[in-house]
Amino acid sequence: MARRTIFSSESVTRGHPDKICDQIADGILDAFLDQDPGAEVAAECAVSTGLVFLAVNSVANVSADVTRIARDVIRDIGYSAQSGFDPDTCSVVTSVSHRTPDRRRGSEPPTHQASLFGYACLDTPERMPLPIVLAHGLARQLDHARQKGKVPYLAPDGKTLVAVEFEDHQPTRIHTVIVSVQHSPALDRPSRLEADIRDTVLPAVFDHAPIGLDRRTKVLINPGGAFLVGGPRRDAGLTGRKNVVDTYGGFARQGGGALSGKDPDHVDRFGAYAARYMARNVVAAGLASRCEVHLSYGVGEEHPLAVTAETFGTGDDEQIERALARLIDLRPNAIVDRFGLRALTGHHGGEFYRRLAAYGHFGRTDLDIPWEREDLVGALGGAARRAG
């Protein structure tokens, strides 16, 4: 008998307090990399009622006005005095440590240490699990409906959740959809919000999804009641607290640390991107229908301590591992160079990492992301045959 399970993933809008922090931290990173692609940056952000706190360490030939960046990001997200977080009057407290490089990059021994995971499957064209793709789609459409004036009383803060029913690991139907979104007092009745979300937001996501809504799907709009107070007035925010949202929605393991606020030489970034790249190409090459790649790096070691593939019985794990080892140089500098991680900001109008900070780092189709390319498929298939 087929086994039925239900799995849910959540996403958040750009105005969620934690996502505000991720975007500010990555906005600061972009500002440094746009001027000095070799900059070393670690940026953390916390927000609360009327307050932004920034802790920034940098080694670069340039500096950045981090206070201005924070205010610009908050304003761009859509916050104002009316929505409860004024970018012009909020207090911005900074702790900034900056020094000019005094030695050639790469002269110090590797200090990377982390355990990273990458995942891919056949649920969606993006090779991503269906629940997180749909949750991200809803969050994006909430922001779009607000910013384009389609649902003008919406405010920036919001959450989405999609529960998908699976049968023997295959998605079969949408079980539940939950949308919780901040709104202004201009919303005169809850029924209007539900009608607008059903008419404007849901079709934009589910009309093009691999699986649509059916008559049994539960659709809950602001089930907690009125959502007038949102953003940092409602909850404090912190960089890196939405790792599950940033990766696979909990559908696959994750490792290392937060992705945002770190320059590309941080193993948490380049390792997570490399693992996803390998898993996606394995699935795209037809070597497995599901694949999780695990990378492990240790301090002082240039090469990863381990590279393992798990295909959950859908492929030859050892053959895939040997093929990956033949094709990809996983030394940190080699990964950074392969994906051009330090040049991406300059190639995307000076704000690549800030744009990446909302709606997930994987499966994106709105950005030209090198770790999402399937350019290893032909070589991987041939290497796998030789390895076998």
Image (tube, rainbow, N blue to C red):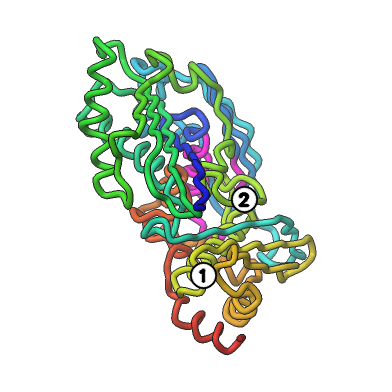
Whether residue 274 is in magenta: the answer is no
- Residue 228 lies, with reference to residue 139, above or below; the image says above
Q: Which amino acid does label 2 sit on?
A: Gln
Residue 345's spot in the image, x, y percent? 43, 55
Residue 216's spot in the image, x, y percent? 33, 34
Q: Residue 288 carries which label?
A: 1
Label 1 CA crowd tier, 10 Å (few <14, some 14–19, many 20+): many
Frontmost residue, 81 versus 357: 357
> Which residue is painted at 51% across and 57% down in the image?
36
Whether residue 35 is in magenta: the answer is yes
Frontmost residue, 148 versus 11: 11
- Residue found at the far front of this picture: 1
Please identify the quarter of the rendering in which residue 95 is found: top right
> Which residue is painted at 77% across and 67% down in the image?
301
Q: Mark 2 points at which residue?
A: 254
- Residue 295 lies, with reference to residue 358, above or below; the image says below
Q: What residue type is labelled 1?
A: Ala
Please identify the quarter of the rendering in which residue 157 is found: top left
> Which residue is painted at 27% across and 35% down in the image?
201
Look at the image and give the residue range highlighted in magenta: 21-43
